[in-house]
Image (tube, coloured by chain):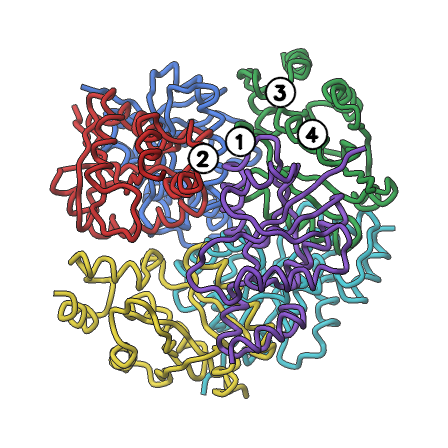
Chain colours: A green, B purple, C red, D blue, E yellow, F cyan
Amino acid sequence: MKQVLAIYPGSFDPVTNGHLDLIERGSKLFDRLVVAVLQNLEKDPLFSVPERVEMLREVTRPWANVEVDVFDGLLVEYARRRKAQALLRGIRAISDYEYELQMAMMNRKMEPNIETVFMMPSVKYSYLSSRLVREVARLHGPLKDLVPPLVEERIRAKVT
Amino acid sequence: MKQVLAIYPGSFDPVTNGHLDLIERGSKLFDRLVVAVLQNLEKDPLFSVPERVEMLREVTRPWANVEVDVFDGLLVEYARRRKAQALLRGIRAISDYEYELQMAMMNRKMEPNIETVFMMPSVKYSYLSSRLVREVARLHGPLKDLVPPLVEERIRAKVT
Amino acid sequence: MKQVLAIYPGSFDPVTNGHLDLIERGSKLFDRLVVAVLQNLEKDPLFSVPERVEMLREVTRPWANVEVDVFDGLLVEYARRRKAQALLRGIRAISDYEYELQMAMMNRKMEPNIETVFMMPSVKYSYLSSRLVREVARLHGPLKDLVPPLVEERIRAKVT
Amino acid sequence: MKQVLAIYPGSFDPVTNGHLDLIERGSKLFDRLVVAVLQNLEKDPLFSVPERVEMLREVTRPWANVEVDVFDGLLVEYARRRKAQALLRGIRAISDYEYELQMAMMNRKMEPNIETVFMMPSVKYSYLSSRLVREVARLHGPLKDLVPPLVEERIRAKVT
Amino acid sequence: MKQVLAIYPGSFDPVTNGHLDLIERGSKLFDRLVVAVLQNLEKDPLFSVPERVEMLREVTRPWANVEVDVFDGLLVEYARRRKAQALLRGIRAISDYEYELQMAMMNRKMEPNIETVFMMPSVKYSYLSSRLVREVARLHGPLKDLVPPLVEERIRAKVT
Amino acid sequence: MKQVLAIYPGSFDPVTNGHLDLIERGSKLFDRLVVAVLQNLEKDPLFSVPERVEMLREVTRPWANVEVDVFDGLLVEYARRRKAQALLRGIRAISDYEYELQMAMMNRKMEPNIETVFMMPSVKYSYLSSRLVREVARLHGPLKDLVPPLVEERIRAKVT
């Protein structure tokens, strides 16, 4: 019997309904799913990494086999340390997809034993990205249906 | 503990090294992988469906959790009958990808509980397709490295 | 005051909910919208041209400024005859879009005074095409939400 | 009789011949066309927003139903305030197109009653963008045929 | 000193102004350029292979280093026989490009010493293809600017 | 007899095995090939322009007809000054390709006598870019097979 651990890496600044949709789908296919927040030094984050982690923990509570973690450095090294067999990536648009394929090939080059697996979020989230959410948030546009209620609340507290 | 059965559907006329590469990758992530040959009425097949199945059985023998089967009708209905949780698809080029996404969305619409999962074959097979193999075969071009030796042999017997 | 007549050309074999969605959107922007069925000799149609026209008339009845017509020959010549200022096209996927741009450039070359205007159907129909509907129909798959009820009924009568 | 107001939003830093081509095409299809300059805080603009507006007013003078305006905040909120029924966007390349579709879907999500309409500039401007114009200008390359003469003059005055 | 022979393969049914534009560009970069007509058994050709060759010879007469030839079988085998160092291909749209890349990779796999080189036709021919020309011809649309005058004449004689 | 000089422009920060692969291919087709380093003011370079030039000279030593140079300002003006007939560009992914086509069209507009010629690097380098190399370098990931040994050494010296 297999025991597959998959890693879903990203910035999650903030987590959107599209991310959540993908986490739910991944949690059904893999024995364990680690949502891994990249600890990078972004120029202009909306939320700090600890804030993102806390929100992710809150909103992924319904799925028992989902865990939230933080990593820095090379993704494949983190994945190797975690003994992961798969990296999970969501794909929506073509432009995503190109960059995703390049990253996946590079990662395979560095670590041939870890597979990248692509899944589709629900079509109703196909236009959604953290960047668009941040833009809408900064312009005080409506966030309902774009992010979970908890995240909407936190954004409102931030950007007033 | 999860028990995930995935289906890898296709025409496989003939199976290429790119297909085999993907089957190997899939067999590592899923508990069971069913290679399902579509029983359609193609205009101008190189091999009959029973011939394709027999070659697939031969070349997938190394992987104990891989099974070869035949289906007709709607893919998602076959998947439901087999109690599959996932459909496996290989993606190489962008044009593939577009059509694949449309099919995946349609399949999700008809059966929301079955996920489509995309994986990449090795970059060295990124140009390879059954159609190109058939064309090269008909023009008596070299098939080494494109298909398994058994398949090369059968093609040679066919197209002389 | 402008009076703009737009033509929405296609095969409509059969009309889908995606087409209807676009017709509704177009009817709001243009003074008159002509849904123009191409009278070509397709290899393997599901419905005859008169059947398609009849179904289109039925399902577009709610919009007073929408008319259904048939044409053959060059689209731009038909458009010129109808004194149209615009051709309406729906775009969903990238592959569509490429071919659409080529056609639009060719049409502009032949008739510079008629503009091609692209609109998006609802995201929930982004995977939908007449070809997919015909495939699902032939395999007796579910058609609900893909086509209007009237069309579903007619298809059921056809493909039993 | 319909009265359709369309908004053509952008940065227009500076307006190019491709923009002008699209404005002319849009002015023929819509009763009124508002060219709306986004009042954002770009990092390194070539012209200030008032300078862009002034040049746009000058070069769009030939079309009586074209107006130039400035907006900030959410585009769809501006559009709602102006009682627009349509947003006009030019599409040239695929990469444009992808981002455009995402924005259009997001805008429709926030305001379902405003349609995004895509039109093609003349094929001879398909390579043209404000960014390329700024780069050529900074390197003292030839600007003839890329921007209207008035804009060329202003650029020459700026970048010496 | 190098002596580079390049092959420009295709169906050329019929040769278009876009092909001619590319031939002219190629003739400037390569010592010799062979326009090679594929002797395949297409379903529904407009011109026979000898007719295509004759028209190509006529319209390429201005370039002394351009030769017209016919081939069947594998392109790379023909190229090897001709001692070519390069295959010339025109690229216009993305969809072209994908298929072209796949072919180029397959050809390199079979014959690593022959390079595929891509060049762009003039932007004013970016929408042009033999297929579109055949469609316009069959619908008696205008062919001026799409094909050389000689070809237009021959088409007129064919499709009345 | 033709004497064709081609220019292969880029940032080369640093030169990768993909660049080298393309330089080797180009050196076979053109009489002379100039690798031209763009003297721009990038935000965050890994190597200075003189360092890049020195490494390029070292690693291109095997090809007698390859020269390394530096340029600033408009590429086509540099190319004109060098009396080049061609610009050489490598294409891998679609997104590259789009931007490349736009640049090529712009360059043709400014200097119609210089052709842009596209060639493919080996498929095994299709995922490789200087940007990815810099990222891997900064995260202390493995660089073997990505860059020539000399460059790997210099990177190691830089990023400790």
Position of D152 compared to F29: left or right? left
**Few, some or many C-alpha atoms within 10 Å of disc 2 (few <14, some 14-19, many ≥20)?**
some
Q: In the structure shown, which secondary structural element does the residue marked by tag 2 occupy?
A: loop
Q: In the rendering, at what x and y percent does residue D140 appear?
A: 47, 52
Q: In the rendering, at what x and y percent does residue F37 appear?
A: 63, 62
**Same-chain check, marks 2 and 3:** no
- C21 in relation to D16, above or below: above
**Same-chain check, marks 1 and 3:** yes
Kind of residue at badge 1: Val
Do residues under tags 1 and 2 come within 8 Å of each other at their CB atoms?
Answer: yes
**N-term-proximal mark, 4 vs 1:** 4
Find disc 1 in the rendering and name its residue. A123
The alpha-carbon separation of the residues under discs 2 and 3 comes to 22 Å
Looking at the rendered image, the quarter that the C terminus of chain A falls into is: top right
Residue C126: image tag: 2
Residue A23: image tag: 4
Chain under label 2?
A: C
Chain under label 3?
A: A
The alpha-carbon separation of the residues under discs 1 and 3 comes to 15 Å
Q: In the structure shown, which secondary structural element does the residue marked by tag 3 occupy?
A: loop
Q: Residue shown at 64%/49% (left/top)?
A: A101
**N-term-proximal mark, 1 vs 3:** 1
**N-term-proximal mark, 3 vs 4:** 4
Q: In the rendering, at what x and y percent does residue C135 appear?
A: 42, 43
Is residue A39 in view from this perspective? no
Q: Nearer the viewer, residue F146 or C69?
A: C69
Chain under label 4?
A: A
Front of the two marks 2 and 3: 2
